[in-house]
Image (spheres, rainbow, N blue to C red):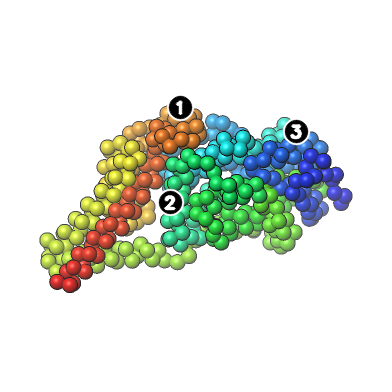
Amino acid sequence: MTQPPTPPAWADQPHAFVERDGVHYTLLGTAHVSKESVVAVEAALASAAFDVIAVELDAARHRALTDPDALAKLDLVAAIQSGKAGLLAANLALAAYQRRLSEQLGVEPGAELKAAALGAEARGLPLALIDRDIGLTFRRAWGRLGYWKRSMLGAGLLASLLADEKVEDGAIETLKQGDVLEASFAEFAGQSPELFEAVIAERDRYMAAKLREAGRAHPGRRVLAVVGAGHLAGLKAALVEDALEPAARIAELERPPVASGPPWFTIVLVAFLLGGFAWGWHQGGIETGGAVLLHWVMITAIGGALGCLAAGGHPLSILAAALASPITPLHPALGSGTFSALTEAWVRQPDYADFLALRDDTRRIGGWWRNRVARILLNFFLTSLGTVVGIWAASAGILSRLLGGAAG
């Protein structure tokens, strides 16, 4: 099959041609913070050389780019109840990060993807959203990390929620190579093979499979795929070499992350607590055992309550954080952040205006406390952080009691 002529406007842009199963794929590599990439995409669309347009977007990101009211339609309480508070906060952090880039560089991150999506619609061309759901990518990246790296990622994410400084030059250079998620994770947690696998390599294979699906739906046609330049080599290789059926590859890469082993941290912590209570009971009966138990309850409750207070939580939210914090380590579903955030959403229910102002409010530090939606998510993070600090402080106190008692 003859390759389509390369329009002069994108001749100098990273691109590749792949032909497979009778379908011709043109992969146009873009930078997500480049006006030149927007011009290149518009020129490629204007050439009328393509029958299908594919973009590096999932349904949620496509909706966020093309529907200004998407956030206003969110059921916040249902999202928190289903365990997605952390994901929502991560998305807001990513949005705030992109806003900082937009202000700094004068171009909206992902503008070329938006141009491709809207251009396909305007021309009546089929649009294929080929990227994996961002929430699943976050979960699979999180599932690949050990406890220490998760702590680093969580701390970096929290810092990004509150950051208002310029984006580092290194992150901008990464973005010029074309992947906003990679640059964001790099700013949060530094370079990591585990993160690269989930954020880049897996998505290369996933997008290749989605492209093959789109090609099969339109046999013999020409497909333009607009993707970050950082994906170009991996996507081309996967498109050429992957022998697995597209549906099977997609199913493999959409499976939720599987725990790599038993939750040793939780097991050790619970064993330590039970052992401390038992030792205290053995040494001094109900008085000593009760003192150990009271120490645990008080310190963890104070930690969670202070975290909620720092987030500007309602008194009832602070009470919920204090009650949930002592039992949080015993079961993952009993997270203090979830309880306090749900209480905050109940007593200070956000209105439509809060959702509409969310993107602008989260651009500044003070906006996270002023906007009710943002404050609920901040409540989730800071309460969880306060509980973690309380757990470590309470554990250190119990260990000190045990060692002091043994020495005596």
The residue shown at (61%, 50%) is 174
The image shows residue 77 at horizontal and vertical percentages of 41, 39
Circle 3 sits in a helix, a strand or a loop, which is it? loop
Q: Do residues under tags 1 and 2 come within 8 Å of each other at their CB atoms? A: no
Crowd class of label 3 (few under 14; some 14 to 19; many from 20; radius 10 Å): few
The residue shown at (52%, 41%) is 166
Circle 2 sits in a helix, a strand or a loop, which is it? helix
Which numbered disc, 3 or 2, marks the residue that appears first in the sequence? 3
Taking depth in this image into account, of 352 and 230 the one nearest to the observer is: 230
Marks 3/1: CA–CA distance: 34 Å
Crowd class of label 2 (few under 14; some 14 to 19; many from 20; radius 10 Å): some
Q: Is residue 45 visible?
A: no
Q: Residue 341: give its label.
A: none
- In this rendering, is residue 49 above or below 295? above
The residue shown at (22%, 64%) is 400
The mark closer to the camera, 3 or 1, is 1
Which residue corresponds to mark 1?
A: 353
Tell me the kind of residue under disc 1: Ala
Which residue corresponds to mark 2?
A: 155
Marks 1/2: CA–CA distance: 30 Å
Which residue corresponds to mark 3?
A: 123
Taking depth in this image into account, of 268 and 360 the one nearest to the observer is: 360
The image shows residue 334 at horizontal and vertical percentages of 34, 51
Tell me the kind of residue under disc 3: Arg
The residue shown at (72%, 31%) is 122
The mark closer to the camera, 3 or 2, is 2
